[in-house]
Image: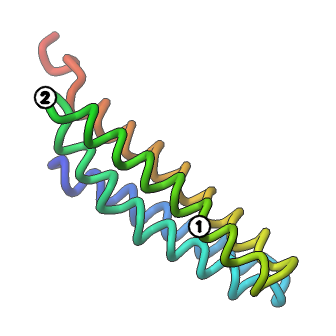
């Protein structure tokens, strides 16, 4: 399996789990959690791919640092915008967004580990 396919399979798995988890929430929180999961997917998918592709290059630390800054900034900004608008449901949105971001960071790490391990040299 290629690097791109492995990463996209992980993204698809996280998206599916996010959809199932969102569907299991009370109806009043589903829309907010769905938006949070969507924002997390839209943000993390290209940032994770960029980081995975830069592993082993001189620019990796810069790419990784900018990606983390973008993730933290998004959570911070959405938190300040969502709470006044959504009230109590903002927790569902932020929780879903952060859960998707963390899950996709794990996919990013697992993809990179598989790609850059020395397993095939044994």
**Of tags 2 and 1, which is closer to the observer?**
1
Question: Which color scheme did the rendering employ for the protein?
Answer: rainbow
Residue matched to label 1: 77
Instruction: Please tell me in which quadrant of the rendered image residue 70 appears.
Output: bottom left
Residue 31: percent from left, percent from top: 69, 88
Quadrant of the rendered image containing residue 30:
bottom right
* In the foreground, 28 or 6: 28
Structural crowding at the residue carrying mark 1, measured as other residues with C-alpha within 10 Å and reported as few (<14), some (14–19) or many (≥20): few
Residue at figure coordinates x 59%, y 67% from the top left: 77
Vertical comparison of 74 with 114: above or below: below
Residue 23: image x %, image y %?
A: 70, 81
Q: Secondary structure at mark 2?
A: loop
Q: Is residue 79 left or right of residue 51?
A: right
Q: Which residue is found at the position 12% from the left and 30% from the top?
A: 57
In the rendered view of the protein, which quadrant contains the C terminus? Answer: top left
Q: Position of residue 80 (x, y in %)?
A: 69, 70
Is the C-beta separation of discs 2 and 1 under 8 Å? no
* Label 2 sits on residue: 58
Task: Using the image as rendered, state which of residue 52 and residue 11 is in the foreground.
Answer: 52
The residue sitting at 75% across, 86% down in the picture is 85
Rendered view: 99 above or below 54:
below
Q: Is residue 80 above or below residue 50?
A: below
Q: Is residue 107 above or below residue 58?
A: below
- Residue depicted at x 57% and y 71%: 37
């Amino acid at each position: 399996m290629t690097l791109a396919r492995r990463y996209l399979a992980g993204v698809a798995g996280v998206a599916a789990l996010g959809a199932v988890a969102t569907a299991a929430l009370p109806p009043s929180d589903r829309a907010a959690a769905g938006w949070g999961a969507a924002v997390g997917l839209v943000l993390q998918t290209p940032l994770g791919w960029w980081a995975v592709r830069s592993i082993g290059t001189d620019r990796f630390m810069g790419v990784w640092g900018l990606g983390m800054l973008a993730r933290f900034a998004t959570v911070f900004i959405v938190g300040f915008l969502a709470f006044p608008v959504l009230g109590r449901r903002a927790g569902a949105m932020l929780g879903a967004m952060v859960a998707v971001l963390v899950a996709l960071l794990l996919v990013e790490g697992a993809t990179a580990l598989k790609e850059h391990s020395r397993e095939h040299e044994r």
